[in-house]
Each structure stands twice: as C-alpha cells, then as structure tokens.
C-alpha cells in the first residue's frame, strides 16, 4: 500500500495521468461535475442544517434551564368522596405553601390568563390577550423590557392598575411612540403604561407572543375576572445545584394533598420540564445532521460511480498499453497507482471545488437566508459549515476517490499481454 501511495504522488506519474485525463476533456469535465455537484449540495445541506439547529437551540437556549411549568387537568381517579373527572385550580395559597415547604425552589411565579380586550388610542384600536404575572416572572422566564420597567411585587401587593404593553401593540396602536407614564383605555378601564416588552424568542411562547400581550399584576387580573385566588400556571425554577425533576414530586404531593386528589392520579397534574424539551430539540438537531449526511453521501456515491465507470472505460481503451507494460515487467503497484491516481485527481479536484463553491455561496447569503416566506419564515442562525465538518467532508471525498478507482484498478491488474495482442 505504501508503494502504491508513493507512486500515486510521483511527479512523473502525475504528469502522465494529467495527459491521460486531458486527452478527453469533455468526458473528464462531465464526470467531475457529478462529484462537484454532489459536494456542493452536501455543503449546502450541512450549512442549512447548522442554521436550523442554531435557530432551534438558540431559541430554546434562551429559556432558563432547570425550570418546569405546572398545569392542572381533570382528575382521573375517584378519591375522598369525589368522583373522577373533577375540575380543580391551583390557588395562590398553594403557591405560598409550596414556597414555604420546598426550600430548593429558586423562583416561583404564576401566570393568570384573562380575556382578549380591546385597547383604544384615538382612531386606532385592537384586541389583545391579557396576562397577569408576579414580580418574579422576569427572574423565571426571559423578557426584554425596552422601555420603563416590568411588573414588580408592589404592583401585585397593591393590585395597581398598571400595564406593560407588547412592542407590536405600541407599533400598531400608538404608531411606534411609547406611551410611557400615560393612561390608556383597555376594555373600557384606564391603566397606566409602565413599560414595553419585546419578544425574546420566536420559537417558544407561554400562551401568546410577548409582542402581542398586555401584562398586568396577576392580582388585578384575578379581580377583573372574578377568579378569586385561582392561578392558571405555575412556573418553578430550582436552585442551580438541584435537578428540577426532584422538585416536581414534592410540588405534586403538596398540591394533591391540598385538593383531595389521589396520590396515584397521574393525569390530574401535569408538568412541562423544559430541560427535557431542550434534550428533545438537541436530539432533533442530531437527527437532522444524520439525515443530511445520509442524503449527501448518497449524492456523492452516485458521483463516485460515475468516476469509476469513466476510469473503467479508460482502462478498456488502454488495454493494449497496460498489457504491453505488464509484458515488459511493470509492477502491479505501478499499474494500480496510475488508475487510482486518475480517479483520485478527478474526485478530489471536483470535490474541493464543490466544497469551496458551497462555502462561498453560503457566505454570500450570510444570516439573511431564510426558509419559508412571510411571518412563518425561519431565520437561519450562522448557516455556515464549521471547520471540523469541512475536514470530515474532505476526508470523505478522498476516500470516495480511492474507492472509485479500486474496481478499475482490479480490472487493469487482470489484463495480460495476450489481451493486448487480441485487442490489437
């Protein structure tokens, strides 16, 4: 094998191979184009795959880790005199007891949903979702406040009539001018605007987009809609060194005990562990990469088959020459090296060209490349081929080039002097 490799990279050998390839330029170029296109498409698909993974992981990565969402469902088991199928709600008192009995909790925040209410500014109006939160909300879930401030604990305690408007509401109803400190009418009631919030991630929302939501103290929403102390969702974030999964059992036990729900009822209480969701998306990214490699390698192999066929034709055309060389004592490694060199030069030259063209094309598109159209379009984050993947692709190209020359080389070794005489 070492002898073959030395002869492949011999200067005289390369010159001889070059003459052989340029003898029929059109055939060589058409064969090389198959490999070029395969590598180009592989680079494109891998780059787009990286952009999709960047979009997914970037969006989910902005959500705090070690966090879970707590929902209520109808009971599925009769218990303590209650029938199954009973509706129930988490109460503010439940949240306070959870805080007191589970010291591993870092932050806990409720979300209370109201109706979609009409907001009016002169001749402009629109209907937007009402949401009630506590002062702990921004410590639990990421929110970008571009003007003013967010809801705080004092707003909640005093049930203040204050609101934080989503950026889209400001743009559509107030012509992009922030009404900070001013009073606006929402559902016929006046509220003071204390801040403006914007969407931090497009791929994860809790019920509604931040840009299109009117946020109030949750105590105010409870009062407006006669909810008593009912809460919609609890967001719980564990301390850094405590797995959130270990807290879910404690929270579930407290809530089931307080609301007379069977400890064996696995339906009445639902947890959405965001760490598990993140792992699912990471696995999805890995699956996307694997699928792209499978499809890309299939395209490359089809190009390699074309190279192998063309080199096979070249061997057949040179039966006389190869037979004579065998007759005068040419070593098998010399015959093999020439055939392998032809295959390798076509494949590597076309492959590197496709690699450079693909990387250059994606660099030209940059971060402006999107999948889809309109508001549903997905913006690709850093859709570029990383260095390690490029090196892997180059290694694959070289291996395919060597593999494409194996069959023609074996055929060349079987040629004898008598074959050359018959051919003559």
Image (spheres, rainbow, N blue to C red):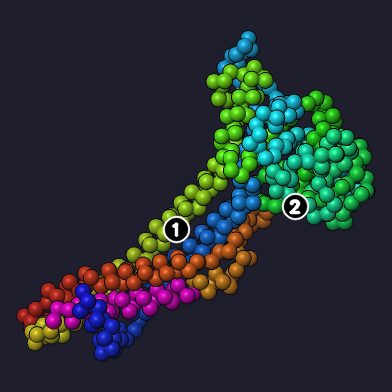
* Residue at (74% x, 45% y) in the render: 138
| Left or right: where 288 falls relative to 35 | right
**Residue range corresponding to the magenta coloring:** 331-357
Q: Is 344 one of the magenta-colored residues? A: yes
| Left or right: where 76 falls relative to 229 | left
| Left or right: where 260 falls relative to 420 | right
Residue marked by disc 2: 144
Q: Is 223 one of the magenta-colored residues? A: no
* Residue at (40% x, 73% y) in the render: 351
**Residue 40: image location, x then y, percent:** 45, 69
The secondary structure type at the circle numbered 2 is strand
Rendered position, 66 above or below 289: above
The secondary structure type at the circle numbered 1 is helix
**Residue 123: image location, x then y, percent:** 92, 49
Q: Pointer 2: residues within 10 angstroms few (<14), some, or many (20+)?
A: some
| Left or right: where 289 falls relative to 71 | left
Disc number placed over residue 292 in the picture, else none: 1
Prevailing secondary structure class for the magenta stretch in the rendered image: helix
Discs 1/2, front: 2
* Residue at (51% x, 64% y) in the render: 47
Query: Within the image, what quadrant is residue 84 found in?
Result: top right
Residue 123 seen in render: no
Q: Pointer 1: residues within 10 angstroms few (<14), some, or many (20+)?
A: many
Residue 178 seen in render: yes
Disc number placed over residue 403 in the picture, else none: none
**Residue 122: image location, x then y, percent:** 93, 48
Front residue (pair 327, 55): 55
Looking at the rendered image, the quarter that the N terminus falls into is: bottom left
């Amino acid at each position: 094998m070492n002898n073959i490799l030395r002869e492949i990279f011999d200067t005289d050998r390369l010159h001889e191979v070059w003459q052989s390839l340029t003898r029929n330029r059109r055939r060589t170029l058409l064969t090389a184009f198959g490999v070029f296109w395969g590598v180009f498409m592989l680079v494109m698909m891998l780059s787009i795959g990286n952009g999709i993974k960047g979009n997914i992981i970037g969006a989910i990565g902005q959500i705090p880790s070690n966090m879970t969402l707590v929902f209520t469902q109808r009971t599925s088991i009769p218990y303590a005199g209650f029938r199954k199928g009973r509706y129930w709600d988490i109460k503010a008192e439940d949240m306070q007891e959870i805080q007191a009995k589970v010291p591993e909790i870092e932050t806990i925040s409720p979300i209370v949903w109201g109706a979609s209410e009409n907001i009016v500014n002169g001749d402009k109006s629109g209907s937007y979702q009402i949401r009630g939160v506590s002062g702990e909300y921004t410590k639990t879930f990421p929110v970008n406040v571009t003007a003013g401030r967010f809801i705080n604990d004092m707003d909640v305690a005093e049930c203040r009539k204050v609101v934080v408007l989503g950026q889209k509401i400001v743009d559509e109803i107030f012509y992009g001018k922030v009404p900070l400190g001013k009073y606006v009418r929402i559902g016929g009631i006046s509220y003071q605007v204390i801040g403006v919030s914007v969407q931090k991630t497009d791929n994860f929302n809790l019920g509604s987009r931040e840009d299109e939501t009117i946020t109030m103290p949750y105590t105010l929403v409870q009062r407006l809609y006669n909810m008593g102390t009912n809460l919609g969702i609890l967001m719980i974030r564990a301390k850094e060194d405590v797995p959130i999964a270990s807290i879910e059992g404690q929270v579930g036990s407290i809530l089931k005990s307080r609301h007379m729900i069977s400890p064996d009822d696995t339906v009445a209480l639902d947890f959405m562990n965001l760490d598990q969701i993140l792992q699912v998306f990471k696995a999805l990214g890995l699956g996307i990469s694997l699928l792209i490699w499978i499809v890309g390698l299939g395209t490359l192999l089809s190009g390699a088959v074309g190279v192998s066929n063309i080199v096979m034709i070249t061997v057949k055309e040179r039966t006389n020459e190869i037979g004579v060389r065998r007759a005068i004592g040419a070593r098998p490694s010399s015959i093999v090296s020439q055939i392998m060199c032809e295959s390798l030069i076509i494949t590597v030259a076309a492959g590197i060209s496709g690699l450079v063209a693909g990387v250059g094309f994606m660099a030209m598109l940059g971060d402006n490349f999107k999948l889809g159209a309109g508001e549903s379009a997905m913006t690709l984050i850093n859709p570029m081929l990383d260095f390690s993947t490029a090196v892997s692709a180059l290694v694959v190209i070289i291996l395919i080039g060597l593999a494409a020359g194996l069959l023609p080389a074996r055929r060349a070794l079987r040629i004898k002097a008598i074959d050359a005489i018959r051919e003559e």
